[in-house]
Image (tube, rainbow, N blue to C red):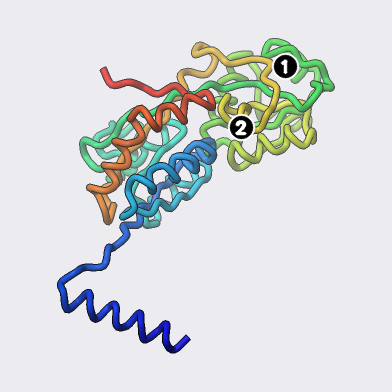
Amino acid sequence: MKKRICLLLALLVACCATGVALAETTELVVFAAASMTETLTEIKAAYEAEHPDVSLVFNFDSSGTLKTQIQEGAACDVFISAGQKQMNQLDISRDESVNPDRLDFVAAGTRIDLLENKVTLVVPEGNPKGIAGFDDLAGRLASGNVLLAMGNSDVPVGQYTQKILAFYGLDEAALAKTGVLTYGTNVKEVTTQVKEASVDCGVIYGTDAYSAGLTVVDSATAEMCGQVIYPAAVLSTSAHPEAAQAFLDYLTGDAASAVFEGVGFTPVRAE
């Protein structure tokens, strides 16, 4: 052990004496919606192989939770939200109606619409309740003979679900009182409830359904809940803005797009 330590010290001294600098690794912290866990984990391996001087550190959670952490001062270089609402709340260039606190965390000129997803209705293996789609679900919720898992109100997938309920004229609060709704703090929790068959169905993203191997019985239309767009941006508080922008640029390239498309995302192409 002593010989190894001495050898290492000698190597360090030699590098200094000859002017050879030891490579420094830039640690990029990426806050991303939980629905991107599988794709970004795959992309991480490829990106770090191409950029050995960069180490990607991910924080996956609901976009609402991530937005709050950023607002409270958490170190973050790149933010990818599953909804425009959370990004708008951090973007000073947006109107006061969507950013009432006038928060200024989005670096100017870096925000892009990265991906589009689908909101889907999924069921456990075998579809025990025989749920046919959203129309069928609406009737069953009204009659109280189904248990639906959905995201909390501060989670984008929960907000999309609320729009679907409103589309069918259903009162979420009234439904919750009758016991036909359960909640998850992010899309992964909702997915797990369906996967474990602790509920009859759930509303999650198409990409999460694909990754979990769940059966999709219906997909929501834009009329029902709007488009599901994932915005991304470098943060103005980033310690490594150039490296952060380089990673964001990579996410719009062919290699990353192929990974996203493989699970059902649709890359948003710049016009």
Whether residue 194 is situated above or below residue 41 in the rendered picture:
above
Which residue is at 73% across, 24% downward?
A: 123
Mark 2 lies on residue: 211
Type of amino acid at the residue the image marks with label 1: Leu
Type of amino acid at the residue the image marks with label 2: Ser
Which residue is at 32% across, 42% downward?
A: 247
Q: Earlier in the sequence, mark 2 or mark 1?
A: 1
Q: Quadrant of the C terminus?
A: top left
Which residue is at 68% across, 29% downward?
A: 213
Estimate the spatial distance between the alpha carbons at disc 2 and disc 1, rounded to whole Å.
23 Å
- Coordinates of residue 76 in the picture (x, y in percent): 36, 52
Nearer the observer, disc 2 or disc 1?
2
Q: Circle 1 sits in a helix, a strand or a loop, which is it?
A: helix
Q: Residues within 10 Å of mark 1 (few under 14, many from 20)?
A: many
In the rendered image, which quarter is residue 86 located in?
top left
Which residue is farthest bottom? 2
Name the residue nearer the viewer: 34 or 70: 34
In the rendered image, which quarter is residue 257 located in?
top left
Q: Residues within 10 Å of mark 2 (few under 14, many from 20)?
A: some
- Coordinates of residue 254 in the picture (x, y in percent): 36, 27
Mark 1 lies on residue: 137
